[in-house]
Image (cartoon, rainbow, N blue to C red):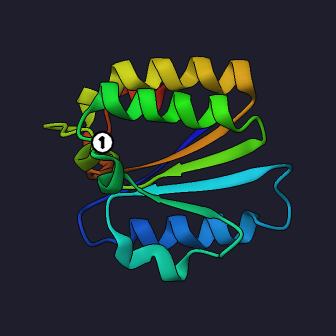
């Protein structure tokens, strides 16, 4: 399953994702990962969740993020849920429509590995691209 949290900048997407992740701790079958590009949220994410700052690994594009995700999953078969906050900023996208290729790749991983992905997008509901609507 691929889920999305979207809204305008400053609308509370990160807070909502952290709340979702923290609420999932007791019911997850395996490990929960939370990827963000800023450390300031580390303290609000439950300590049972693996918080990863993408900047610490110099992830600056779709290919690098996909490779990182693949490597994490290859090294840990217990990943159950992966939250990726600030997706557009992490992959240096010019807009939400730029995630279509990544979505196709994550969809394949999700189906092959049975991992749930929750992604945040900075965009208004009216700007959500078709490639995202296909997953809702």
Q: Residue drawn at (85%, 60%), measured in percent from left and top?
A: 27
Q: Is residue 41 above or below residue 97?
A: below
Tell me the quadrant of the picture where the N terminus can be found. top right
In percent of width and height, residue 122 lies at: 28, 53
Relative horizontal placement of residue 103, taking residue 19 as reference (left or right): left
In percent of width and height, residue 17 lies at: 52, 64
Q: Is residue 108 in view?
A: yes
In percent of width and height, residue 16 lies at: 51, 69
Q: Quadrant of residue 32?
A: bottom right
Q: Which residue is mark 1?
A: 59
**Is residue 55 or residue 95 the one in the foreground?**
55
Q: Quadrant of residue 33?
A: bottom right
Q: Residue drawn at (58%, 37%), measured in percent from left and top?
A: 72
**In the current view of this chain or complex, which residue is farthest to the left?**
94
Relative horizontal placement of residue 23, taking residue 57 as reference (left or right): right
Q: Is residue 22 above or below residue 103?
A: below
**In the current view of this chain or complex, which residue is farthest to the bottom?**
43
**Is residue 61 or residue 101 the one in the foreground?**
61
Q: Is residue 99 above or below residue 58?
A: above
Tell me the quadrant of the picture where the C terminus can be found. top right
Q: Residue drawn at (67%, 47%), measured in percent from left and top?
A: 81
In percent of width and height, residue 52 lies at: 48, 57
Task: For mark 1, give the secondary structure.
Answer: loop
**Is residue 100 or residue 55 the one in the foreground?**
55
Q: Is residue 136 in view?
A: no
């Amino acid at each position: 399953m691929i889920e999305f949290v979207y809204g305008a900048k400053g609308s509370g997407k990160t807070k909502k994702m952290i709340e979702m992740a923290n609420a999932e701790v007791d019911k997850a079958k395996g490990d929960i990962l939370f990827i963000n590009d800023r450390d300031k949220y580390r303290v609000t994410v439950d300590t049972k969740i693996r918080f990863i700052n993408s900047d610490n690994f110099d992830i600056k594009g779709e290919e690098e993020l996909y490779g990182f995700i693949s490597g994490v999953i290859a090294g840990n078969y217990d990943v159950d849920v992966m939250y990726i906050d600030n997706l557009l900023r992490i992959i240096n996208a010019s807009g939400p429509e730029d995630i279509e290729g990544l979505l196709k790749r994550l969809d394949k991983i999700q189906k092959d590995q049975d991992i749930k992905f929750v992604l945040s997008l900075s965009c208004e509901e009216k700007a959500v691209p078709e490639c995202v609507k296909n997953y809702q």
